[in-house]
C-alpha cells in the first residue's frame, strides 16, 4: 500500500509551498488508495510552538487535507534516534566525536535514484562529507531522524520539493546502513515569484493564513496550487480535489520551477466566488465585516441580497467591504476623480436633481421600474442614459464602478437614494 507523509515544522505558519507539498502527497495517496500521514518536525524545541502546530493543522483541514493516522512528534523520539546511531557506531559505519554521532561517508560510491519526476539522478559520495546523525547537544540531525521516522511509518513514497534533492543520497545511505528498504522519491519544482526569484512577501502572501484572511476560498487556493507544476491536460483550469484525485499522475508533473501568479489566483478565486451560494458566503462575509469594524448588524436577508449582487464582481472576500461601504452609512469612500467628472459640471447637477424629482414620484422602487424611469427620462431629454446613470452612481455610492445601478438603488431604498442625489446636486 502507498504510504506518504507531510512533515511540517511548527516554527511558523503553514507556508504556501509547504501546503502545495502536502496537497500533492494527499492527492497521490488518495489516487492510489493509500495513506497520508503527518510527522511533526519539532526537534528545534526552542522555536517550536504549539500555537503554530494548531494553526498548521487547522489550515490543512481548511484546505480539505485530512490525515489517516495519529501524527508522530520527533521531539518525543530522541531516544529512538540515539539508539539507531549507537547501532551504526557498533557496526563500524559511524563514529563518536565527543557527544556527537557521525556517519562515515563511504568513498567512491555513485548513488543513483530514479526520481519519479526528474528521472535518473546521480550523486558521488566523494562530494559529500561525513554526516552528523546526533548533534553534540543530543538533538538529531535532519537527514538521519527523517530516515528513522519514515521507516517507522512504513513510508513508500517521498514527494517533496526540489530543495531536498541534495539530501536524497545522504538519506539513501542511511537506509542502506540501517538495513531498511529505500522508498521511492519524487522532487517537485519549487514555487518561485512571478519574476523568477524565491517566493517572498513582495510577490504576495507566503502563508496559507494570509490567503485565508484575505478572503480566498479554500477550493480556489487548492485548485491554483494543483496547477503549479502539474496539468490535468488540455486547457482545463478549474477542477476540484475529487476530480484531481481521479486523474492525477505524478509522471505529468514538470521538473521546471513553477511561477506564482497572484493575479491568476485572484481570477480563479473570483470564478469560485461567482459560483458559490450566497448563504455559504454569508458567515465568511460577516467575518470580513467584523474584522474591518464595519456593521455586522445588517440583517442577514439584506446582506444576502448584497452578496448575491457583488459575488460576481469581487475577486476576494476582503474586497466586499470597501465595495459595499455605501450601504452601511454615509461615511463611505469617495472617488474624487469621479466626482470631478460626473458631479461638478452644472449640467450634471441639473440632470441629477431632475432625476431625483422624477424618482420622488415613483411608488414602485424596484430595479426594473427604476431603469424604466431612467430610460424614459433620457428619451424625453434626448440624452444618452449614461448622462443620468454616471452622476447618479457617484452620488449614491461615491464610486464610478460597482454593481448594477438600479439594483443598488433598490437595496439602498427610496429615501436614502433621493437624499444623496439631492445633496450631491446642490
Image (cartoon, helix red, strand yellow):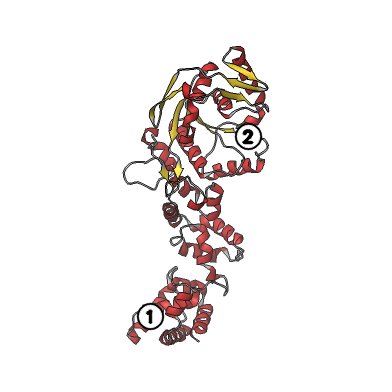
Q: Which mark is residue 387?
A: 1
Q: Residues within 10 Å of mark 2 (few under 14, many from 20)?
A: many
Between 164 and 71, the one nearer to me in the picture: 164
**Above or below, 215 relative to 309:** above
Q: Which corner quadrant of the image does residue 296 belong to?
A: bottom right
Please rate how many residues cluster around mark 1, counting C-alpha atoms within 10 Å: few if below 14, some from 14 to 19, many from 20: some
Residue 42 is labelled as 2
Mark 1 → mark 2, Cα distance in angstroms: 65 Å
Q: What residue is rendered at 59% in x and 17% in y?
A: 94
Answer with left or right where residue 172 lies relative to residue 140. Answer: left
Picture residue at 40% right of the left edge, 37% below the top: 246
Kindly identify the residue that appears in the image at 35 percent across and 86 percent down: 381
Vertical relation: 273 (above or below) 224: below
Indicate which disc, 1 or 2, sits on the residue closer to the N terminus: 2
SS at badge 1: helix
Q: Position of residue 337 (x, y in %)?
A: 45, 75
Residue 301 in percent (x, y) is at 54, 64
Residue 196 position within the rendered picture, expressed as x and y whole percent measured from the top left: 42, 46
Amino acid at each position: 500500500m502507498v504510504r506518504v507523509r507531510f512533515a511540517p515544522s511548527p516554527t511558523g505558519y503553514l507556508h504556501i509551498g509547504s501546503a502545495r507539498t502536502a496537497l500533492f502527497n494527499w492527492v497521490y495517496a488518495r489516487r492510489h488508495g493509500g495513506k497520508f500521514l503527518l510527522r511533526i518536525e519539532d526537534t528545534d524545541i526552542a522555536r517550536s510552538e504549539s500555537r503554530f502546530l494548531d494553526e498548521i493543522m487547522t489550515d490543512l483541514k481548511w484546505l480539505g487535507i485530512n490525515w489517516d493516522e495519529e501524527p508522530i512528534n520527533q521531539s518525543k523520539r530522541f531516544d529512538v534516534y540515539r539508539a539507531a546511531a549507537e547501532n551504526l557506531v557498533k557496526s563500524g559505519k559511524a563514529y563518536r566525536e565527543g557527544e556527537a554521532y557521525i556517519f562515515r561517508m563511504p568513498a567512491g560510491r555513485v548513488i543513483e535514484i530514479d526520481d519519479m519526476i526528474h528521472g535518473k539522478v546521480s550523486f558521488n559520495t566523494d562530494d559529500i562529507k561525513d554526516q552528523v546523525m546526533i548533534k553534540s547537544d543530543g538533538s538529531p540531525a535532519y537527514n538521519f531522524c527523517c530516515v528513522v521516522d519514515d521507516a517507522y511509518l512504513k513510508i513508500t513514497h517521498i514527494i517533496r520539493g526540489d530543495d531536498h534533492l541534495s539530501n536524497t543520497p545522504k538519506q539513501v545511505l542511511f537506509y542502506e546502513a540501517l538495513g531498511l528498504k529505500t522508498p521511492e522519491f519524487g522532487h517537485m519544482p519549487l514555487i518561485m515569484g512571478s519574476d523568477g526569484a524565491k517566493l517572498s512577501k513582495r510577490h504576495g502572501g507566503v502563508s496559507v493564513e494570509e490567503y485565508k484572511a484575505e478572503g480566498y476560498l479554500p477550493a480556489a487556493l487548492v485548485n491554483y496550487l494543483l496547477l503549479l507544476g502539474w496539468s490535468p491536460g488540455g486547457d482545463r483550469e478549474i477542477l476540484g480535489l475529487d476530480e484531481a484525485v481521479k486523474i492525477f499522475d505524478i509522471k505529468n508533473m514538470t521538473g521546471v520551477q513553477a511561477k506564482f501568479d497572484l493575479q491568476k489566483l485572484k481570477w480563479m478565486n473570483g470564478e469560485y466566488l461567482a459560483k458559490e451560494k450566497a448563504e455559504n458566503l454569508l458567515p465568511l462575509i460577516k467575518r470580513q465585516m467584523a474584522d474591518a469594524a464595519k456593521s455586522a448588524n445588517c440583517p442577514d436577508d439584506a446582506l444576502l441580497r448584497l452578496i448575491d449582487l457583488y459575488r460576481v464582481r469581487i475577486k476576494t472576500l476582503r474586497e466586499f467591504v470597501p465595495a459595499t461601504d455605501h450601504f452601511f452609512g454615509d461615511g463611505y469612500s469617495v472617488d474624487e476623480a469621479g466626482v470631478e467628472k460626473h458631479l461638478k459640471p452644472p449640467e450634471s447637477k441639473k440632470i441629477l436633481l431632475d432625476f431625483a424629482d422624477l424618482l420622488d414620484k415613483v411608488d414602485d422602487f424596484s430595479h426594473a421600474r427604476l431603469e424604466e424611469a431612467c430610460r424614459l427620462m433620457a428619451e424625453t431629454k434626448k440624452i444618452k442614459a449614461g448622462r443620468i446613470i454616471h452622476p447618479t452612481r457617484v452620488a449614491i455610492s461615491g464610486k464610478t464602478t460597482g454593481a448594477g445601478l438600479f439594483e443598488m438603488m433598490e437595496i439602498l431604498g427610496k429615501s436614502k437614494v433621493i437624499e444623496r442625489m439631492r445633496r450631491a446636486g446642490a
